């Protein structure tokens, strides 16, 4: 189905799309980390998480299928600043623009988490948006916007009215145009990889 102005309408992903969603995550990681991610166990675990949470309804992904016309180069959309080198594909294969076409060119993924409720959000349910990405050759066509709008509509239908995300500089204008604003609370992270447990002593 094609929406107004020729932009394909985003559809909700199904389990058959999981391998493509993992491949597109590799595209996004290549953009944000300035290097294609090495293939590894992360791909299998990501696929397992997608299957489990799509099945229990706490995660949804909206995608745009690859259009029939050839890709055109152009500046970046949400998730990147423009075409770069090859990105890791599913199973570690590099993205080959002249090879067999992949079924998906864009996606947006969102989860629903349950926190403790408060007067402003009694259920405690909150959304988190991740993996908003469009393949480099298909940017500036509104694909990321279509996926994100469909995802936000899914949240509204589920009654989830608080939604968070982390924005890149390239993606921030899109998110702001859809109503996202800076939170008054800073985002902090503890990365305990490679650190000794708190309170441990050497020897």
Image: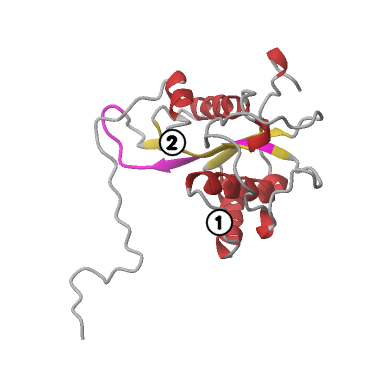
* Residue 109 is covered by the magenta coloring: yes
**Residue 28 percent coordinates (x, y):** 55, 44
Q: Is residue 161 above or below residue 124?
A: above
Residue in the foreground of this view, choosing between 187 and 117: 187
Q: Residue at x 30, y 36 (%)?
A: 117
Q: Residues within 10 Å of mark 2 (few under 14, many from 20)?
A: some
* Residue that carries the numbered disc 2 in the rendered image: 168
Main SS type for the magenta part?
Answer: strand
| Secondary structure found at label 1 | loop
| Magenta-span inclusion, residue 197 | no
Quadrant into which the N terminus falls = top right
Residue 60 versus residue 40 in the image, above or below? above
The image quadrant of residue 13 is top right
Q: Which residue is mark 1?
A: 37
Quarter of the figure with residue 148: top right
Where residue 137 appears, as percent x and y from the top left, is: 68, 34
Which quadrant is the C terminus positioned in?
A: bottom left
């Amino acid at each position: 189905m094609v929406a107004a102005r020729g932009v394909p309408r985003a559809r909700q992903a199904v389990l058959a799309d999981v391998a493509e969603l993992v491949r597109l995550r590799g595209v996004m990681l290549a953009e944000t980390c300035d290097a294609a991610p090495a293939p590894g166990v992360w791909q299998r675990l990501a696929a397992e998480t997608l299957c489990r949470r799509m099945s229990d309804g706490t995660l949804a992904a909206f995608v745009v299928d690859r259009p029939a016309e050839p890709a055109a180069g152009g500046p970046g959309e949400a998730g990147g600043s423009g075409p770069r080198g090859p990105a890791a594909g599913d199973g570690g294969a590099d993205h080959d623009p002249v090879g067999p076409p992949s079924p998906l060119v864009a996606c947006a993924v969102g989860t629903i988490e349950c926190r403790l409720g408060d007067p402003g959000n009694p259920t405690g349910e909150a959304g988190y948006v991740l993996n908003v990405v469009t393949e480099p050759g298909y940017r500036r066509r509104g694909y990321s916007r279509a996926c994100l709008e469909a995802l936000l509509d899914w949240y509204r239908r589920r009654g989830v009215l608080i939604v968070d995300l982390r924005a890149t500089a390239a993606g921030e204008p899109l998110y702001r145009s859809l109503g996202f604003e800076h939170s008054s609370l800073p985002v902090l992270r503890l990365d305990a990889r490679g650190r000794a447990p708190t309170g441990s002593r050497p020897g």
